[in-house]
Image (cartoon, grey):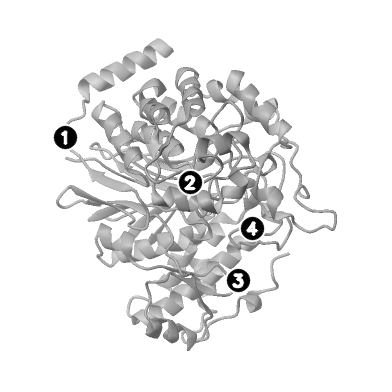
């Protein structure tokens, strides 16, 4: 079988070299770091497709953007295969260890101890990224992992330069990074934030990537790397076992699909709430006089549809392998009509009056890819909080996630992003925590956009605003640059970027009864590609809030 697969790869490369195809004359990548974008382009130039490039970009980000993602985390890869139109969601979300239980983060008084679910080995779910990269390579790529992981291995060995963004996030997590010996050695200098432009070199991570490249998923979930992971986690108070690693499985799921104003929307399914919440908001807007409203009225209506969609998120959503989520109902236009009917065109609703309060990564990462055959990937990856759990397993270079905080540690208790949850998202062995990651495609006969962003609980509303700007004819650079606002049911406030909105704009919302919370900072790191089907051309943009790079090749 391996010989047949290698022969197939050789024939594919022989007859389908990286040249302009009939479908598309260009390829494009937008990611959160220039080195990751370059890694993807390098693989495309070597004859890889968008899926190979996705492996390279994912692995490169794990090296050069450790605050946002990594081999110790998880993610969702939304795929479109051009040759037959096949679309799927590759679910590489973390899972709870088998020893996990619903009360594991409660103190002696029955209260949630947030430090336990955010910092250190006990906060980490079983990683999905390594298995997902192997899955993408085996099932959708052309090139072997030894080739697609080569850029990331090189970056880990040679180092990447410290930026101001890195310094800010390292300072934010400085105390916790110092609590892990290998994290301290790797990401800090004598326990302090490294100097600007100094190099972060990760020899242990390079060795782990080499094991993954040579042996596939077995190089991470079994053998020497697995032994080091388990020993280090258990010595630090974690509950991982060898069986947890061996049992981890990537899932392929049918994406959530719908329509809005003649556009087809394709997004991710549970355990991400992104697709359902996004369609709920769009479906509600279709029931309202949104298109003809002025800007102040549009923001009022947007706030109200956000409020209702996030309320349903808190009530119903979780891992569909464990709980029954009414997916069809929540994403239907009929149900959206009943939600929209409760919206007052002039006055804000009260979140507390929607119903009784329910009994949920800011520094996630995203990239978008289209190759010259029209294959495309929208992928959002995370380790949750900046630098995840801030714990690096000894001898591996693997920075572990703290995605266990995305579960509902207690019914009605908020996670680190203020999201509340219900029984559907309670901690349970081998369960995947609910996510807000929302890699998405939106298209009609004239144009296509591949979109996604990090941003914790604000991810879905950022994608919503980006979609509306796209439909309104905005270009890629404008879409990623515009100021953003967000409502998530609880807390009952509109979070607004500052700077970004004029005082008169905020006053108009307050006069309708909305509570405004200026964030005194900008948020998100959107990466998008737009395909103009008439001219058969691509444009791409990387959010100016970050340090990424978008390239059309």
**Nearest to N terminus: mark 3 or mark 2:** 2
- Residue contact between numbered discs 4 and 3, judged by CB atoms under 8 Å: no
Could you classify mark 4 by the number of other residues whose Cα lies within 10 Å: few (under 14), some (14-19), or many (20 or more)? many
**Nearest to N terminus: mark 1 or mark 4:** 1
Q: Nearer the viewer, mark 3 or mark 2?
A: 2
Q: Nearer the viewer, mark 4 or mark 2?
A: 2
Distance of mark 4 from mark 2, alpha carbons?
18 Å
Please tell me in which quadrant of the rendered image residue 383 appears.
Answer: top right
Q: Secondary structure at mark 1?
A: loop
**Nearest to N terminus: mark 1 or mark 3:** 1
Q: Which residue is mark 2?
A: 68
**Nearest to N terminus: mark 4 or mark 2:** 2
- Residue contact between numbered discs 3 and 2, judged by CB atoms under 8 Å: no
Distance of mark 3 from mark 2, alpha carbons?
25 Å
Could you classify mark 2 by the number of other residues whose Cα lies within 10 Å: few (under 14), some (14-19), or many (20 or more)? many
Q: Is residue 517 left or right of residue 145?
A: right
Please tell me in which quadrant of the rendered image residue 462 appears.
Answer: bottom left
Give the residue at the far top of this rendering: 3
**Nearest to N terminus: mark 2 or mark 1:** 1
Q: Which residue is mark 3?
A: 491
Q: Nearer the viewer, mark 1 or mark 4?
A: 4
Please tell me in which quadrant of the rendered image residue 63 appears.
Answer: top left
Q: Secondary structure at mark 3?
A: loop
Q: Which residue is mark 1?
A: 20
Could you classify mark 3 by the number of other residues whose Cα lies within 10 Å: few (under 14), some (14-19), or many (20 or more)? some
Give the residue at the far bottom of this rendering: 511
**Nearest to N terminus: mark 4 or mark 3:** 4
Q: Is residue 537 visible?
A: yes
Q: Secondary structure at mark 4?
A: loop
Give the position of the N terminus as an image quadrant.
top left
């Amino acid at each position: 079988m391996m010989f047949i697969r290698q022969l197939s790869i050789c024939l594919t490369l022989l007859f389908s070299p990286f040249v302009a195809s009939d479908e598309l004359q260009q390829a494009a990548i937008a990611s959160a770091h220039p080195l990751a974008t370059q890694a993807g382009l390098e693989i495309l130039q070597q004859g890889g497709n968008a899926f190979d490039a996705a492996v390279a970009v994912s692995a490169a980000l794990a090296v050069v953007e450790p605050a946002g993602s990594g081999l110790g985390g998880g993610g969702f890869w939304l795929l479109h295969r051009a040759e037959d139109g096949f679309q799927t969601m590759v679910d590489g979300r973390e899972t709870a260890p088998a020893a996990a239980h619903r009360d594991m983060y409660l103190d002696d008084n029955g209260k949630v101890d947030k430090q336990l679910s955010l910092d250190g080995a006990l906060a980490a779910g079983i990683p999905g990224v390594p298995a997902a990269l192997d899955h993408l390579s085996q099932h959708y790529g052309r090139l072997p992992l030894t080739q697609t992981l080569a850029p990331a291995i090189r970056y880990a060995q040679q180092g990447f330069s410290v930026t101001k963004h890195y310094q800010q996030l390292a300072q934010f997590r400085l105390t916790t990074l110092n609590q892990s010996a290998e994290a301290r050695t790797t990401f800090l200098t004598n326990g302090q934030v490294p100097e600007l432009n100094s190099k972060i070199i990760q020899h242990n991570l390079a060795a782990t990537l080499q094991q993954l490249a040579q042996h596939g998923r077995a190089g991470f979930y079994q053998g020497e790397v697995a032994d080091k992971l388990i020993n280090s986690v258990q010595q630090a108070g974690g509950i991982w076992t060898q069986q947890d690693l061996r049992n981890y499985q990537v899932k392929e799921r049918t994406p959530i699909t719908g329509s809005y104003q003649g556009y087809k929307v394709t997004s991710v399914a549970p355990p991400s709430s992104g697709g359902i919440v996004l369609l709920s908001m769009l479906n509600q807007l279709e029931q309202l006089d949104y298109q003809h409203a002025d800007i102040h009225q549009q923001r009022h209506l947007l706030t109200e549809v956000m409020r209702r969609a996030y309320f349903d998120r808190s009530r119903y959503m979780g891992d569909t392998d464990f709980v029954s989520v009414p997916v069809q109902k929540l994403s239907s236009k009929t149900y959206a009509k009943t939600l929209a009917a409760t919206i007052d065109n002039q006055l804000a609703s009260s979140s507390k009056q929607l119903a009784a309060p329910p009994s949920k990564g800011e520094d996630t990462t995203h990239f978008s890819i289209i190759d010259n055959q029209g294959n495309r990937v929208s992928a959002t990856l995370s380790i949750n909080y900046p630098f995840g759990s801030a714990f690096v397993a000894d001898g591996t270079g693997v920075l572990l996630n703290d995605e266990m905080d995305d579960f509902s540690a207690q019914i009605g208790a908020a996670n680190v992003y203020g999201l509340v949850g219900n029984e559907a998202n309670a901690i349970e062995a081998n369960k995947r925590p609910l996510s807000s990651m929302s890699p998405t495609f939106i298209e009609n006969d004239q144009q296509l956009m591949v979109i996604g962003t990090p941003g914790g609980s604000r991810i879905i509303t950022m994608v919503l605003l980006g979609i509306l700007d796209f439909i309104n004819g905005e270009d890629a650079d404008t879409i990623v640059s515009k100021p953003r606002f967000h409502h998530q049911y609880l807390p009952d406030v509109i979070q607004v970027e500052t700077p970004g909105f004029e005082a008169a704009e905020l006053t108009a919302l307050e006069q309708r009864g909305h509570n405004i919370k200026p964030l005194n900072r900008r948020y998100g790191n959107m990466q998008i590609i737009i395909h103009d089907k008439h001219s058969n051309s691509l444009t791409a943009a990387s959010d100016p809030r970050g340090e990424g790079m978008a390239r059309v090749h």
